[in-house]
Image (cartoon, rainbow, N blue to C red):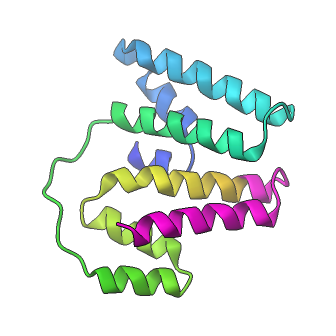
Amino acid sequence: MLQLLAEGRANEVLQSLVNTGNKEVDMLQKRLDEVNQDFDSKKISFQDWAVQQNSINYGVFRLIPQNTRKKEAFSREELKKLIENDNLEAALDLLIKVGYEDVIVLQARLNLAKQQMKNGAIEQADLDTVYEQINDFILAF
């Protein structure tokens, strides 16, 4: 389920959780449907959509059973080098690999923005902003 969320497929994760009896699943599904509908009908901007989507993704992330393994040490220099070399995806993968599973929410944000770009819903500048925001967050890690 974490992989689906990382790929920007929160809807599928919610569908798989629908029979758990958790009322939050229904609430998140309703919010997801509404925010996507508002974005598709151009009632909200990409930035507003992204904020709502991030909130929903985090809510979905919290519903997924988490790996409780201890976080491993990693080289902050290696992480910084990946960012400097425009390899954000590898930087996110590194953090997830060493136990920072909550970074999956950032990975989902990036993948959703890429999907929106591919679908023509946003411009390159919007995608660049997402990359910059995630890079800044990781460098402050």
Q: Where does residue 86 sit, x and y in percent of width and height?
A: 56, 82
**Which one is nearer the viewer's eye here, 35 or 6?**
35
From what the image shows, is residue 102 above or below residue 79? above
Q: Main secondary structure of the magenta part?
A: helix
From what the image shows, is residue 43 above or below residue 5? above
- Residue drawn at (32%, 53%), measured in percent from left and top? 101
Q: Where does residue 126 sit, x and y in percent of width and height?
A: 74, 59
Residue that sits furthest to the left in the current view: 70
Residue that sits furthest to the front in the current view: 140
Q: Quadrant of the N terminus?
A: top left
Q: Is residue 75 left or right of residue 22?
A: left
Quadrant in the rendering for residue 114: bottom right
Q: Quadrant of the C terminus?
A: bottom left
Q: Where does residue 123 sit, x and y in percent of width and height?
A: 82, 60
Range shown magenta: 116-141
From what the image shows, is residue 63 above or below residue 73? above
Q: Where does residue 122 sit, x and y in percent of width and height?
A: 81, 54
